[in-house]
Amino acid sequence: MSHQDDVKAIITAVGGAANVKSLTHCATRLRFELKDGGKVDQASLDSNKVVLGAVPQSGDRYQVVIGGQVASVYDEIMHLPEMAGLGSGTVDADAADGEMSDAELKAAKRNQGVRGKVAWLDNFFEYLADSFRPILGVLLGASIIIALVNLFISLDVIPNDEANTGLMFIKAIWKGVFYFLPIMVAYNAAKKLKVDPWLGGAIMAALMTPQFTALSDTKTWGDAVSCVENTTLGTSSCTATVFGLPMQLSDYSGNVFVPLMMAAVLALVYHGLKKIIPDSVQLVFLPFFSMIIVGALTAFLIGPLGVWVGNGLGVGLAWMNGHAPFIFAIAIPLLYPFLVPLGLHWPLNALMLMNIQSMGYDFIQGPMGTWNFACFGATAGVLFLSIRDKDDQMRQTSIGALAAGLLGGVSEPSLYGIHLRYKLIYSRMLVGCGVGGVVIAVLGWLFPSSAGVHGVTTTAFAFTSLLTIPVFDQMWVYAVSIAAAFLTSMVLIITLDYRTPEQKAEVKARVAAAQKAKAGKGEAAVEAAPAAAEAAATATEEAPAAPAAEAAPTTAVVAPVDGHVVSLDDAGDPVFASRALGEGVGVQPAASVVKAPVSGVLQTVAETGHAFGLKTDDGVEVLVHVGIDTVKMNGEGFDVKVAKGDRVNAGDPLVDVDFDKVKEAGYSTTTLMTVLNTAMLKAVTPKTDVDVKAGDEVIAIEK
């Protein structure tokens, strides 16, 4: 497919435009809210070249990981004719149809408790995330500028001279992002809480004007202003008397706690005023009263409280870093792999920004970088194996994820595209996190930073990538630590692999199918649904078999169970219908015992009892797949009678299945049977639309 076709296929895979309730995007992901999450075609998303990964969320929410090109893909989707009714990522057609609005639907879901056991906690972290996501781009851009400036200064390409006008101009570019960060956060936070975002930005901007900062000038105001030195943080705190009341004055540039708290209070005031102010005058008086009330509350109460909370957390972590650096440096990289997928890392990101604003440096980003590079090292290991195994699908996914990580410091494409899909990766990656943490703890203690801190520090908020290494104090300590984390994870993945034997066999089957397709030996689909692919792949594993020289030729495959025989086209599974797994039949069972359809050796027996792969002595490979999607039953209702490597005769029992339980679970009982190596045989002819007993011929073989 072309790129445009791949983009269109994303909407088709989520159930079509009519199934999309809302669509937004963050730094790397498309965030869908669907009317019916059950309509998502996961296999189609996994095989899409534009998609790095697809992750179902609670309720009917779905996230599709795209990577760095997410904004352009989002724009392309929004310009599709079928998406014309969305408008800025939300669908309003429901109200006209008499259904719940988007807000009502979300509220209903929260009331039902489908988003999590603690709804308010879900909302809190979503609030934090959505307050930062829209500005990740400018934060990333600013961090790269900082890194390049530091690199050029260290190489003596540009002088580190305050009188250098060029340097001052470049600093203004990135400092503008962090200085006015509170206004950006206030805008996003207010928008998230359905408040006029310009109100949030304007109230926060008031605390950053020359008039407000001038209140701390003791020469101008005399006894109306008093200042106290904070020896712990190395800053001064001033208090002015305004309207006869004490107002603590602070430098709010770069602060993120204050705008987050202010926006929450603003939402309460704004929505409360909206209920009592007539609609006809809301345009004027709603912002007027909101600015007066919340502006005063922020200056007198919220601002000082936010600074106090941020400073307190920063000092607490600084104490831990100073007194228990080993625990701190190791705990941070070991926690992050679990915090990031859940979105729980945002509070730590806010603390990093607060540390820089209050203390002039941050000490969390160094240990955090070791986690990031352990993550990227695992992805590099996956890339190595995908090249070795000629796995084009995983190669493309890992290249995109690795580029986003090493150049942008973004871990989500690796996490959602690869790591969370293969459970063995975490056990390898966590070792890399631990090694990186130990290295940075030891070297950080032996070689303190220029700030006198035992650990790696930075004066800028930087996405931990290759490009931002120069922003760290004790750069060589940081570089050695992230290299140790990266190489440890990569070597462990390459040495121990990241896939189970079944998953490796799946790759082997997929690659073999692709090679056959390229050779013109068929147009079978390369990709398979997870359950079918697993069954097919494991069926191709080699197991000891009797020599073929003395074997009688296989001329028929018999029914594995009593029932009615149907064509694969009518069996209800598109993968089997595509003949990607060979020609065959489906049997709608009328008995509970599924038997061997040929004599031979069991190449595989799925742990869940839903699939069996057999190979006859003369090389005919047969797959028996009991039901559709029954892998999800995890073996419940399946009493397996055989084991991998067993030799069986046609008619020997393979598994006793409680098909009533399968039906109750909502899965089809149709038992599918295919000849996997159909392309290698002269003819494979199914006999369909007949009632059979187990042992009756249903497929004729001609070699």
Image (cartoon, helix red, strand yellow):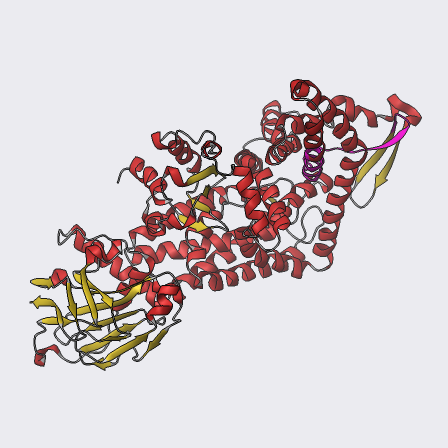
**Which residue is the extreme one toward the right?**
223
The answer to whether residue 156 shows anywhere in this view is no
Residue 544: x, y in percent?
22, 78
Horizontal side of 280 relative to 427 (left or right) equals right
Q: Which residues are magenta?
A: 241-267
Horizontal side of 241 relative to 302 (left or right) equals right
Residue 51: x, y in percent?
37, 45
Viewer-proximal residue among 153 and 512: 512
User: Which image quarter is the N terminus in?
Assistant: top left
User: Which quadrant would residue 172 be assigned to in this image?
Assistant: top right
Residue 90: x, y in percent?
48, 34
- The residue sitting at 61% across, 48% down in the picture is 365
**Which residue is the extreme one toward the front?**
98
User: Which image quarter is the C terminus in?
Assistant: bottom left
* Vertical arrangement, residue 546 with respect to residue 256, above or below: below
Viewer-proximal residue among 58 and 522: 58
Q: Is residue 261 magenta?
A: yes
- The residue sitting at 21% across, 72% down in the picture is 562
* Vertical arrangement, residue 318 with respect to residue 243, above or below: below
Residue 170: x, y in percent?
58, 27
* Vertical arrangement, residue 260 with respect to residue 623, above or below: above
The answer to whether residue 536 shows anywhere in this view is yes
Horizontal side of 468 relative to 612 (left or right) equals right
Viewer-proximal residue among 155 and 323: 323
Q: How many marks?
A: 0
Q: Is residue 601 magenta?
A: no
Horizontal side of 377 relative to 453 (left or right) equals left
User: Which quadrant would residue 154 be assigned to in this image?
Assistant: top right
User: Which quadrant would residue 587 be assigned to in this image?
Assistant: bottom left
